[in-house]
Image (cartoon, rainbow, N blue to C red):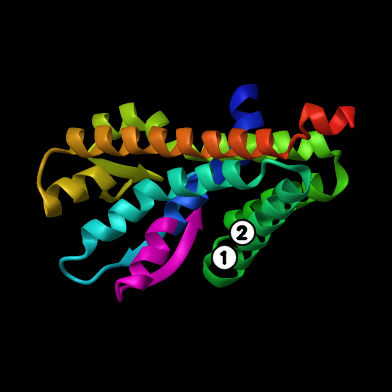
Amino acid sequence: MSWGRLLLYPFTLVASWVHEMGHGLAALCVGGGFGRLQVFLDATVLAHTAAPLGREGLVAMAGVMAPAIVGSSIIALSRGPTRARAVLLVLAAAMVLTSVLWVRDVTGLIMVPTVALMGAAIALKTGADTRRIFAQFVGLYVALDTPLRLDNALAVRVWWLDGMTTRPTDFVVLATHWGRSRFVWSLGASVVSVLLLALGLLIAWWRSGRSEPAMSDIAG
């Protein structure tokens, strides 16, 4: 593993975790099952889910869009140091909770809580600017998860993990159950992800600007 991939490992794991938790929670919401969350050493995460007939597309779409929704929300909510601390602590707590509920493999039981504790340590032990910048970088990296995987999503039709076929890609599932091509679904999801990211950045910028004191207040 290169130094760049190693440095980005915690962020990649968080993005993969958000994506797969989107699948898992959606499966539960539509009346299906969420058996376990499997974590691999390369930061790949796999949610073992079952969806009722006809609702597979909803479960696939939830995983595709979860990173954009969560990432843009992190950016919008962590515009100040106090809010950034709260966002990082909530994210860390959620990762630990899902480890208890759904992670069963040794790699996951080590890596997910470790990354969660790293985030909590940054939230509690670093300065205001550091934790705010860190939280917003996490949000940016997570929000761009789907667009950054666009080339891979178009290149493959099934996921391979540990040398075994696991399941069709999300865009193949969407094309199969909802029509259109996987190219249309992947491109559409990427565009919506970028728009959600832009909205999160706009909210963060707008709120930050409003929180600054006016020049008349300073002069007075």
| Type of the residue with mark 2 | Met
Membership of 147 in magenta stretch: no
| Type of the residue with mark 1 | Thr
Residue at the spot 22% in from the left edge and 39% down from the top edge: 185
Above or below, comparing residue 81 to residue 117 in the picture = above
The answer to whether 75 appears left or right of 46 in the picture is: right
As drawn, the label of residue 98 is: 1
The residue that disc 2 covers is: 95
Task: Specify the segment rendered in magenta.
Answer: 22-41
Above or below, comparing residue 26 to residue 201 in the picture = below
Residue at the spot 63% in from the left edge and 55% down from the top edge: 91
**Residue 40 at x, y = what percent?**
51, 48
The answer to whether 154 appears left or right of 180 in the picture is: right
**Residue 79 at x, y = what percent?**
67, 41
Q: Quadrant of the N terminus?
A: top right
Whether pointer 1 and pointer 2 mark residues with C-beta atoms closer than 8 Å, the reply is yes
Q: Quadrant of the C terminus?
A: top right
Give the CA distance from mark 1 to mark 2.
Answer: 5 Å
Residue at the spot 62% in from the left edge and 54% down from the top edge: 112
